[in-house]
Amino acid sequence: MELVIGLILLYSGYALGIAAFKAGLPVKRWAFAGALLGPVAYPLLNSHKQLAYRKAMGKQGRTISL
């Protein structure tokens, strides 16, 4: 059981590291968060990715969504 949990945590760290790299976020930080928190860190990554996009786009990045 511990082996399965360990493998899930390692894979989660790897997957979040790849996702952070693609989003332009700090890879080591998100890989560590993924290895520490597991799949729970994925919603945090998504929110940080969205905040970083909004910060980069500034006021011109506003869109109207229906």
Image: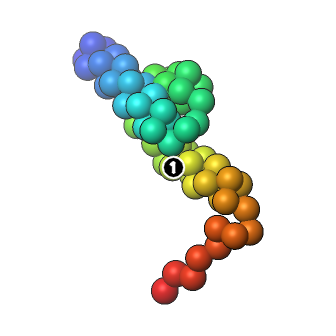
Residue at (74% x, 69% y) in the render? 59
Residue 1 visible in the displayed image: yes
Q: In the image, is 48 to the left or to the right of 2?
A: right
Name the residue located 52 percent from the left edge and 81 percent from the top edge: 65
Mark 1 Cα-neighbour bin, 10 Å: few <14, some 14–19, many ≥20? some
| Number of disc labels | 1
Give how far across and how far down residue 24 sits, in percent. Answer: 55, 38
Q: Is residue 31 above or below residue 48?
A: above
Name the image quarter holding the N terminus: top left
Q: Residue furthest front?
A: 60
Residue 64 drawn above or below residue 59: below
Quick one: which residue is furthest to the right in this view?
Answer: 59
Viewer-proximal residue, 62 or 17? 62
| SS assignment at label 1 | helix
Please state if 40 lies on the left or on the right of 11 as rendered: right
Please name whichever residue, 53 or 48, is drawn nearer the observer in this view of the structure: 53
Q: Quadrant of residue 8?
A: top left
> Residue 52 location in percent, x, y?
64, 49
Residue at (57, 82) in percent of width and height: 64
Residue 7 point in image, percent of width and height = 30, 18
Q: Check disc 1 and report the residue beneath it.
A: 46
| Residue extending furthest toward the bottom | 66
Q: Residue 62: give x, y in percent of width and height.
A: 64, 73
- In the rendered view, how is the structure colored? rainbow
* Residue 40 visible, this orientation: no
Amino acid type, label 1: Asn
Q: Residue at x 67, y 59 (%)?
A: 57
Residue 20 in the image: above or below residue 55: above
The answer to whether residue 47 is left or right of residue 66 is right
